[in-house]
Amino acid sequence: MAQRFPGINDDEITNVDRNTFRQGLLAGLPGTVHFGRTVTGYRITDAGRVRVAFADGGHDEGDVLVGADGVGSAVRRGLLPHATVRDLGLRCVYGRMALTESTEALVPEVLRRGFSWLSDDTGCGAGFAPVRFRSRPQDVPDYLMITLLATPERLGRPDEELFRLPPEDLWKLTTDLTAGWDPGVRELFARADRDGFFPITIRAGVRVESWRSGPVTLLGDAVHTMPPTGGVGANTALQDAATLAGELLAAARGEQSIADAVAAYERVMLPRGFDTIDDSLRMAARLFGSPPADGGPHPFDVLHR
Protein backbone atom coordinates (compact mmCIF):
# COMPACT_ATOMS: atom_id res chain seq x y z
CA MET A 1 0.00 0.00 0.00
CA ALA A 2 1.69 3.23 -1.14
CA GLN A 3 1.62 6.33 1.02
CA ARG A 4 -0.05 9.44 -0.31
CA PHE A 5 0.16 12.81 1.40
CA PRO A 6 -2.10 15.34 -0.40
CA GLY A 7 -0.51 18.73 -0.93
CA ILE A 8 2.99 17.59 0.10
CA ASN A 9 5.84 17.17 -2.36
CA ASP A 10 8.00 14.07 -2.23
CA ASP A 11 10.97 16.00 -0.86
CA GLU A 12 8.96 17.56 1.98
CA ILE A 13 8.13 14.46 4.01
CA THR A 14 9.49 15.14 7.49
CA ASN A 15 10.11 12.79 10.41
CA VAL A 16 11.10 14.60 13.58
CA ASP A 17 13.73 13.28 15.97
CA ARG A 18 12.27 13.37 19.46
CA ASN A 19 15.40 14.66 21.19
CA THR A 20 15.73 17.50 18.69
CA PHE A 21 12.07 18.33 19.05
CA ARG A 22 12.41 18.33 22.83
CA GLN A 23 15.31 20.76 22.62
CA GLY A 24 13.19 23.04 20.47
CA LEU A 25 10.33 23.01 22.94
CA LEU A 26 12.69 23.89 25.79
CA ALA A 27 14.41 26.72 23.91
CA GLY A 28 14.18 30.04 25.73
CA LEU A 29 12.94 28.49 28.97
CA PRO A 30 16.01 28.32 31.24
CA GLY A 31 14.99 28.40 34.87
CA THR A 32 11.33 27.86 33.96
CA VAL A 33 11.24 24.11 33.38
CA HIS A 34 12.39 21.85 36.21
CA PHE A 35 13.03 18.11 36.11
CA GLY A 36 13.36 15.31 38.64
CA ARG A 37 10.18 15.95 40.63
CA THR A 38 7.36 13.40 40.70
CA VAL A 39 3.79 14.61 41.20
CA THR A 40 1.86 12.48 43.67
CA GLY A 41 -1.38 14.44 43.84
CA TYR A 42 -3.02 17.83 44.11
CA ARG A 43 -5.78 19.70 45.90
CA ILE A 44 -7.79 22.82 45.10
CA THR A 45 -7.35 25.48 47.75
CA ASP A 46 -10.09 27.60 49.31
CA ALA A 47 -8.97 30.44 47.02
CA GLY A 48 -9.57 28.26 43.94
CA ARG A 49 -5.91 27.71 43.14
CA VAL A 50 -4.23 24.32 42.71
CA ARG A 51 -1.63 23.02 45.16
CA VAL A 52 0.53 20.19 43.81
CA ALA A 53 2.32 17.67 46.04
CA PHE A 54 5.63 16.10 45.06
CA ALA A 55 7.14 12.78 46.08
CA ASP A 56 10.02 14.52 47.83
CA GLY A 57 7.60 16.27 50.15
CA GLY A 58 7.63 19.64 48.38
CA HIS A 59 4.68 21.60 47.05
CA ASP A 60 3.90 24.18 44.39
CA GLU A 61 0.83 26.26 43.65
CA GLY A 62 -0.71 27.96 40.62
CA ASP A 63 -3.90 29.06 38.90
CA VAL A 64 -4.10 26.07 36.56
CA LEU A 65 -2.67 22.55 36.65
CA VAL A 66 -2.22 20.85 33.27
CA GLY A 67 -1.64 17.13 33.55
CA ALA A 68 0.63 16.34 30.59
CA ASP A 69 2.26 13.45 32.43
CA GLY A 70 1.57 10.63 30.01
CA VAL A 71 -0.28 7.35 30.10
CA GLY A 72 0.39 6.81 33.82
CA SER A 73 -0.80 10.32 34.70
CA ALA A 74 -1.07 11.01 38.43
CA VAL A 75 -3.16 14.08 37.59
CA ARG A 76 -5.65 11.97 35.65
CA ARG A 77 -6.00 9.60 38.58
CA GLY A 78 -7.01 12.52 40.77
CA LEU A 79 -9.28 14.24 38.24
CA LEU A 80 -10.85 11.22 36.52
CA PRO A 81 -10.37 8.15 38.70
CA HIS A 82 -12.89 6.27 36.54
CA ALA A 83 -10.94 6.83 33.29
CA THR A 84 -9.34 3.69 31.89
CA VAL A 85 -6.61 2.86 29.41
CA ARG A 86 -6.95 -0.30 27.34
CA ASP A 87 -4.02 -2.64 26.76
CA LEU A 88 -4.33 -3.62 23.09
CA GLY A 89 -2.42 -6.84 23.65
CA LEU A 90 0.53 -5.68 21.55
CA ARG A 91 4.15 -4.93 22.39
CA CYS A 92 6.51 -2.85 20.29
CA VAL A 93 10.29 -3.02 20.38
CA TYR A 94 11.88 0.21 19.16
CA GLY A 95 15.38 0.58 17.77
CA ARG A 96 17.38 2.45 15.15
CA MET A 97 20.10 1.95 12.59
CA ALA A 98 22.58 4.77 12.09
CA LEU A 99 22.69 5.85 8.44
CA THR A 100 26.32 5.90 7.44
CA GLU A 101 28.08 5.56 4.11
CA SER A 102 27.98 1.78 4.46
CA THR A 103 24.44 1.34 5.83
CA GLU A 104 22.68 3.92 3.62
CA ALA A 105 22.88 1.57 0.66
CA LEU A 106 21.12 -1.17 2.64
CA VAL A 107 17.84 0.76 2.86
CA PRO A 108 15.51 -0.25 -0.01
CA GLU A 109 14.03 2.58 -2.03
CA VAL A 110 10.54 1.69 -0.86
CA LEU A 111 11.56 2.40 2.77
CA ARG A 112 13.13 5.79 2.07
CA ARG A 113 9.96 7.88 2.05
CA GLY A 114 7.97 8.50 5.21
CA PHE A 115 6.79 5.60 7.35
CA SER A 116 6.68 2.08 5.89
CA TRP A 117 5.11 -1.06 7.32
CA LEU A 118 5.86 -4.73 6.67
CA SER A 119 4.20 -7.78 8.22
CA ASP A 120 4.12 -11.54 7.97
CA ASP A 121 1.26 -14.00 8.48
CA THR A 122 2.31 -15.04 11.97
CA GLY A 123 1.27 -11.93 13.89
CA CYS A 124 4.48 -9.96 13.54
CA GLY A 125 4.98 -6.57 11.89
CA ALA A 126 7.78 -4.06 11.45
CA GLY A 127 7.80 -0.31 10.85
CA PHE A 128 10.58 1.79 9.35
CA ALA A 129 11.06 5.56 9.00
CA PRO A 130 14.20 7.47 7.98
CA VAL A 131 15.15 10.51 10.07
CA ARG A 132 17.45 12.95 8.30
CA PHE A 133 18.56 16.14 10.03
CA ARG A 134 18.46 19.48 8.29
CA SER A 135 20.67 20.91 11.05
CA ARG A 136 22.57 18.01 12.52
CA PRO A 137 23.17 17.90 16.30
CA GLN A 138 26.76 17.25 17.24
CA ASP A 139 27.76 13.59 17.00
CA VAL A 140 24.22 12.47 16.03
CA PRO A 141 23.93 10.70 12.65
CA ASP A 142 20.88 10.37 10.46
CA TYR A 143 19.13 7.12 11.28
CA LEU A 144 16.46 4.66 10.27
CA MET A 145 13.83 4.09 12.95
CA ILE A 146 13.19 0.36 13.27
CA THR A 147 10.29 -1.18 15.17
CA LEU A 148 9.01 -4.70 15.65
CA LEU A 149 5.45 -5.20 16.85
CA ALA A 150 3.81 -8.43 17.97
CA THR A 151 1.72 -10.04 20.67
CA PRO A 152 3.50 -11.19 23.84
CA GLU A 153 2.83 -14.76 22.74
CA ARG A 154 4.57 -14.18 19.42
CA LEU A 155 7.47 -12.48 21.17
CA GLY A 156 7.73 -15.47 23.47
CA ARG A 157 8.37 -13.27 26.52
CA PRO A 158 5.94 -12.32 29.29
CA ASP A 159 5.95 -8.65 30.21
CA GLU A 160 7.84 -9.16 33.45
CA GLU A 161 10.70 -10.63 31.39
CA LEU A 162 10.42 -8.48 28.25
CA PHE A 163 10.66 -5.18 30.09
CA ARG A 164 13.75 -6.31 32.01
CA LEU A 165 15.73 -7.40 28.95
CA PRO A 166 18.82 -5.31 28.19
CA PRO A 167 18.91 -3.54 24.80
CA GLU A 168 21.18 -6.10 23.15
CA ASP A 169 18.84 -8.96 24.12
CA LEU A 170 15.91 -7.01 22.66
CA TRP A 171 17.91 -6.54 19.47
CA LYS A 172 18.57 -10.30 19.37
CA LEU A 173 14.84 -10.91 19.82
CA THR A 174 14.06 -8.84 16.73
CA THR A 175 16.62 -10.65 14.62
CA ASP A 176 15.31 -14.04 15.74
CA LEU A 177 11.69 -13.16 14.97
CA THR A 178 12.55 -11.88 11.49
CA ALA A 179 14.92 -14.74 10.63
CA GLY A 180 12.60 -15.98 7.87
CA TRP A 181 11.98 -12.56 6.31
CA ASP A 182 13.45 -11.08 3.14
CA PRO A 183 17.26 -10.90 3.39
CA GLY A 184 17.23 -7.13 2.81
CA VAL A 185 14.92 -6.56 5.78
CA ARG A 186 16.85 -9.00 7.96
CA GLU A 187 20.01 -7.04 7.22
CA LEU A 188 18.41 -3.83 8.57
CA PHE A 189 17.70 -5.50 11.90
CA ALA A 190 21.12 -7.15 11.93
CA ARG A 191 22.89 -3.81 11.40
CA ALA A 192 20.76 -1.88 13.89
CA ASP A 193 22.40 -0.26 16.93
CA ARG A 194 22.34 -3.01 19.55
CA ASP A 195 22.37 -0.64 22.52
CA GLY A 196 19.35 1.40 21.42
CA PHE A 197 16.41 -1.01 21.68
CA PHE A 198 13.57 -0.63 24.20
CA PRO A 199 10.02 -2.04 24.52
CA ILE A 200 6.66 -0.34 25.04
CA THR A 201 3.10 -1.55 25.62
CA ILE A 202 0.58 -0.46 22.98
CA ARG A 203 -2.39 1.14 24.74
CA ALA A 204 -5.40 3.26 23.83
CA GLY A 205 -7.46 5.57 26.00
CA VAL A 206 -11.12 4.65 26.50
CA ARG A 207 -13.51 7.48 25.68
CA VAL A 208 -14.74 9.42 28.71
CA GLU A 209 -17.65 11.79 29.01
CA SER A 210 -17.02 15.47 29.66
CA TRP A 211 -16.71 16.50 33.29
CA ARG A 212 -17.27 19.67 35.24
CA SER A 213 -14.40 21.94 34.28
CA GLY A 214 -12.16 23.52 36.87
CA PRO A 215 -8.57 24.65 37.37
CA VAL A 216 -7.23 21.16 36.58
CA THR A 217 -7.17 19.72 33.07
CA LEU A 218 -5.32 17.15 30.97
CA LEU A 219 -3.33 17.10 27.74
CA GLY A 220 -2.04 14.47 25.32
CA ASP A 221 -1.60 10.85 26.41
CA ALA A 222 -2.64 11.78 29.95
CA VAL A 223 -6.24 11.96 28.73
CA HIS A 224 -6.45 10.31 25.29
CA THR A 225 -3.64 7.76 25.25
CA MET A 226 -2.78 7.33 21.59
CA PRO A 227 -1.65 4.09 19.96
CA PRO A 228 1.25 4.82 17.57
CA THR A 229 -0.43 3.18 14.57
CA GLY A 230 -1.82 6.50 13.32
CA GLY A 231 1.50 8.30 13.74
CA VAL A 232 -0.33 11.26 15.28
CA GLY A 233 0.25 11.00 19.03
CA ALA A 234 2.68 13.91 19.30
CA ASN A 235 0.72 15.98 16.77
CA THR A 236 -2.49 15.51 18.74
CA ALA A 237 -0.77 16.60 21.95
CA LEU A 238 0.56 19.67 20.14
CA GLN A 239 -2.97 20.46 18.96
CA ASP A 240 -4.08 20.23 22.59
CA ALA A 241 -1.30 22.57 23.68
CA ALA A 242 -2.09 25.12 20.96
CA THR A 243 -5.81 25.10 21.77
CA LEU A 244 -5.23 25.43 25.52
CA ALA A 245 -2.62 28.16 25.07
CA GLY A 246 -5.00 30.16 22.89
CA GLU A 247 -7.76 29.98 25.47
CA LEU A 248 -5.47 30.85 28.38
CA LEU A 249 -4.04 33.81 26.46
CA ALA A 250 -7.59 35.05 25.93
CA ALA A 251 -8.10 34.78 29.69
CA ALA A 252 -4.86 36.68 30.32
CA ARG A 253 -6.17 39.48 28.11
CA GLY A 254 -9.32 39.64 30.22
CA GLU A 255 -11.59 38.30 27.48
CA GLN A 256 -12.80 35.37 29.59
CA SER A 257 -12.22 33.75 32.95
CA ILE A 258 -9.67 31.00 33.49
CA ALA A 259 -12.53 28.59 34.21
CA ASP A 260 -14.16 29.47 30.88
CA ALA A 261 -10.81 29.08 29.11
CA VAL A 262 -10.33 25.56 30.45
CA ALA A 263 -13.92 24.62 29.63
CA ALA A 264 -13.57 25.92 26.05
CA TYR A 265 -10.37 23.90 25.62
CA GLU A 266 -11.94 20.69 26.91
CA ARG A 267 -14.95 21.04 24.59
CA VAL A 268 -12.56 20.87 21.64
CA MET A 269 -9.89 18.56 23.04
CA LEU A 270 -12.06 15.67 24.22
CA PRO A 271 -13.93 14.76 21.01
CA ARG A 272 -10.91 15.52 18.84
CA GLY A 273 -8.60 13.32 20.89
CA PHE A 274 -10.86 10.31 21.10
CA ASP A 275 -11.92 10.58 17.44
CA THR A 276 -8.20 10.46 16.61
CA ILE A 277 -7.80 7.32 18.71
CA ASP A 278 -10.59 5.71 16.70
CA ASP A 279 -8.80 6.66 13.49
CA SER A 280 -5.56 5.17 14.80
CA LEU A 281 -7.29 1.91 15.64
CA ARG A 282 -8.82 1.74 12.17
CA MET A 283 -5.34 2.26 10.72
CA ALA A 284 -4.05 -0.54 12.94
CA ALA A 285 -6.67 -2.90 11.53
CA ARG A 286 -5.50 -2.01 8.01
CA LEU A 287 -1.84 -2.48 8.88
CA PHE A 288 -2.35 -5.84 10.53
CA GLY A 289 -4.59 -7.21 7.79
CA SER A 290 -7.54 -9.57 7.79
CA PRO A 291 -8.07 -12.63 10.03
CA PRO A 292 -6.37 -15.84 8.89
CA ALA A 293 -8.14 -17.75 6.11
CA ASP A 294 -8.22 -20.92 8.21
CA GLY A 295 -10.64 -19.29 10.61
CA GLY A 296 -8.16 -19.18 13.46
CA PRO A 297 -7.89 -16.25 15.87
CA HIS A 298 -6.48 -13.06 14.46
CA PRO A 299 -3.25 -12.15 16.31
CA PHE A 300 -4.48 -8.55 16.58
CA ASP A 301 -8.17 -9.35 17.12
CA VAL A 302 -8.30 -6.96 20.09
CA LEU A 303 -8.13 -4.07 17.62
CA HIS A 304 -11.42 -5.08 16.00
CA ARG A 305 -13.47 -5.20 19.20
Image (tube, grey):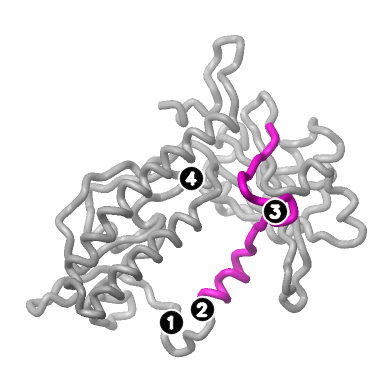
Instruction: Give the mark, 1 or 3, whose residue is nearer the N terminus.
Output: 1
Measured as percent of width and height from the top left, residue 82 is found at 22, 47
The numbered mark at residue 33 is 1
Within-10-Å neighbours for mark 4: few <14, some 14–19, many 20+: many
Q: Residue at x 57, y 30 (%)?
A: 286
Side (left or right) of 272 relative to 22: left
Residue interval drawn in magenta: 1-26
- Residue lying farthest to the left in this orientation: 46
Residue 264 sits in which quadrant? bottom left
Q: Which amino acid does label 4 sit on?
A: Pro
Q: What residue type is labelled 3?
A: Met
Asked whether disc 3 touches disc 4, contact meaning CB atoms under 8 Å apart, the reply is no
Mark 2 vs mark 4, foreground winner is: 2
Residue under pointer 2: 26
Within-10-Å neighbours for mark 2: few <14, some 14–19, many 20+: few
Residue under pointer 3: 145
23 is within the stretch colored magenta: yes
Seen from the viewer's position, the closer of residues 236 and 11 is 11
Query: Separation of disc 3 and disc 2 at Cα?
Result: 24 Å
Query: Separation of disc 4 and disc 1 at Cα?
Result: 27 Å
Side (left or right) of 279 relative to 153: left
From the image, which quarter does the N terminus lie in?
top right
**Residue 184 visible to an observer of this rendering:** yes
Measured as percent of width and height from the top left, residue 143 is found at 75, 59
Measured as percent of width and height from the top left, residue 88 is found at 46, 37
Q: Which residue is drawn at 75% across and 71% down?
A: 140
Residue 182 in the image: above or below residue 211? above
Asked whether disc 3 touches disc 2, contact meaning CB atoms under 8 Å apart, the reply is no
Asked whether disc 1 touches disc 2, contact meaning CB atoms under 8 Å apart, the reply is yes
Asked whether disc 2 touches disc 4, contact meaning CB atoms under 8 Å apart, the reply is no
Residue under pointer 4: 227
